Image: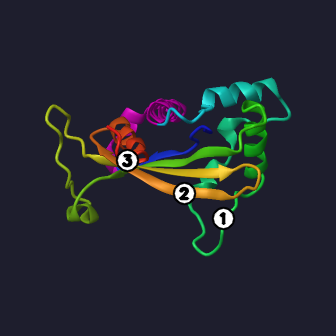
Amino acid sequence: MVPLTLVAAEESLGWGPLLGERRAALAKGDSVLGTLLQARAPEVTWILPGELRRAARRAPGIAPDPDQMGSSILMRGSKHKPETVPDPLRSELRTLAALAGGGGGRYVLVPAGLVFRRTGGPDQRSGEAAARPTAGQPDRPSGTAELTVVLADVRTGRVGFRTVARGEGPDPWTALTRAVKSLTPGLP
């Protein structure tokens, strides 16, 4: 799994302080993703962002910086033709997979982007607060995490699947947790 490189939240959520500095939010997002995916899909040999970073540091000049790849370009796909990962991202993913996976890794999970949107009913369109605060929570609206995830074949460059996992919560990390859990439905 490559690191998350894009996180954004609608200003109306007021989640800026909860997300904190961009780099810290990306790291926390990677942590939530890695922890839940390992627990919910233990049959997969997961190579997490930290391992990719270490592999890239061992091969300076050869490996790209996993935190500087343009993986967010995969957020939107084509509906009219089979999709491939564009270069240079395709070659960067292949290089990282070879270095970190000992040459045997063929597929890479790309969290292309994480966007937090305000959850609400019809009043949301008019800009009014439609979501009610949770008991014990400050007067903060509920939000929806939209995590775009792509599975790419690093040998052929083909996108195997793309989905947008969604989860609601009173804060970004609860919403993200619920979104990741929606990737593996049927599990507690």
How far is mark 3 from mark 2, CA to CA? Answer: 16 Å
User: For residue 108, which quarter of the picture?
Assistant: top right
Stretch of the chain drawn in magenta? 12-40
> In the picture shown, does residue 76 fall above or below 184?
below
Left or right? Give the position of 27 relative to 106.
left
First in sequence: mark 1 or mark 2? Answer: 1
In terms of depth relative to the viewer, which is nearer, 110 or 155? Answer: 155
What is the number of the mark on residue 162? 2
Label 2: few (<14), some (14–19) or many (≥20) C-alpha neighbours in 10 Å: some
Q: How is the image coloured?
A: rainbow
Name the residue beneath numbered marker 3.
185
First in sequence: mark 3 or mark 2? Answer: 2
Name the residue beneath numbered marker 1.
83
Marks 2 and 1: in contact by CB < 8 Å?
yes
Residue located at (63% from left, 55% from top): 73
Q: Is residue 64 visible?
A: no
Left or right? Give the position of 176 relative to 94.
left
Label 3: few (<14), some (14–19) or many (≥20) C-alpha neighbours in 10 Å: few
How far is mark 1 from mark 3, CA to CA? Answer: 26 Å
How far is mark 1 from mark 2, CA to CA? Answer: 10 Å
Q: Position of residue 39 (x, y in %)?
A: 45, 30
